[in-house]
Image: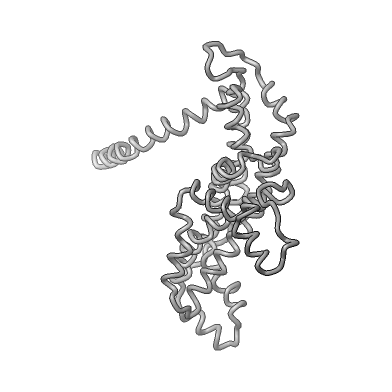
Amino acid sequence: MNQKKGRSKFIFLCVAPAFILFAIFMIIPTINVFRMSVYKWSGFSASKEFVGFDNFRILFEDMVFIKSFQNTVLLLVVVTIITMSLALLFAAIMSREQVKGKDLYRVVFYIPNILSVVIIAAIFSAIYDAKDGLLNGFLGMLRLDFLQNMWLGDQRIVIYSVAAAMIWQSVGYYMVMYMASMSSIPESFYEASALEGTGKVRQFFSITLPLIWQNLRNTLTFFIISSINLSFTLIKAMTGGGPDGSTEVFLNYMYKQAYTNSSYGYGMAIGSIVFLFSFGLSLAVSRITKRETLQY
């Protein structure tokens, strides 16, 4: 009995510091965001006016917020599909094929992930420059002048220009993660399937993908949530939400309302929606992608 009590006490002492830090930096601030969302407060004055759910009622009639929500969902869908597909494709090629200079390519692909988001924004702003940018210059060199555009000034395509920067930043990191999973798959599986005449594409879908599914599932949830944060920093640095709100995302809109428009309570109402959306999306992705774990 004394040994059991001592073990419980040891576990409590090990877990308590982490739980206290989690409560201080995560639980209490999150509760405070929900609490402040029912107040009308500038963020600077001493007086706060309780307005109940008025902030949320105004929010759902706010066309800028609705546009920012649409942009966020669009970025999540486009960037997630393309990034995950490219990362899997590159990982499969680098793991299964004899590529000369494989280690060099791995480093080159990974470099964007260690760069500051502000530097990435500066790089792509220079590439997209309408007058002296690399992209328009390259198109002009190929005699494709009709494809030249104002990549960060045209409301129809600017969101996709930002999406390209997000994809470039993320592909290398996830490629390395998938390569680690793929390298642990026994070679005998591929040899046996090759003897039966199975092609490489079918091997990928029948062997590789099922055996790395748990890693893919975990990284997918992580990527979707981190993309919400990445879209904010990239758009803040590249377009500021413009032109004319065409690249507004809801974290950028929350920042503007809370810290530059002196509508802190309204900003926290947006923050509450962002939290609920992220939490619900994580649960949905986790549930949809749930599969039986394969042992090998």
Q: Residue at 60% of width from left, 72% of height from top?
A: 205
Q: Residue at x 52, y 11 (%)?
A: 46
Q: In this rendering, is residue 241 above or below 86?
A: above
Say whether residue 252 is visible: yes
Q: Nearer the viewer, residue 63 or 217?
A: 63
203 on left or right of 160:
left
Outermost residue toward the top in this view: 47
- Residue 236 in the image: state x and y as whole percent: 57, 40
Q: Which color scheme does this rendered protein use?
A: one colour
Instruction: Please give the name of the residue rendered at 67% of the width and 52% of the height, measured from the top-left corner.
Output: 151
Residue beneath the point at 46% across and 63% down: 176
Q: From the viewer's perspective, is residue 91 above or below residue 71?
A: below
Q: Position of residue 8 (x, y in %)?
A: 31, 39
* Residue 166 visible at all: no
Q: Nearer the viewer, residue 242 or 290?
A: 242
Q: Position of residue 29 (x, y in %)?
A: 48, 29
Quarter of the image with the N terminus in it:
top left
Image spot of residue 31 (x, y percent): 52, 27
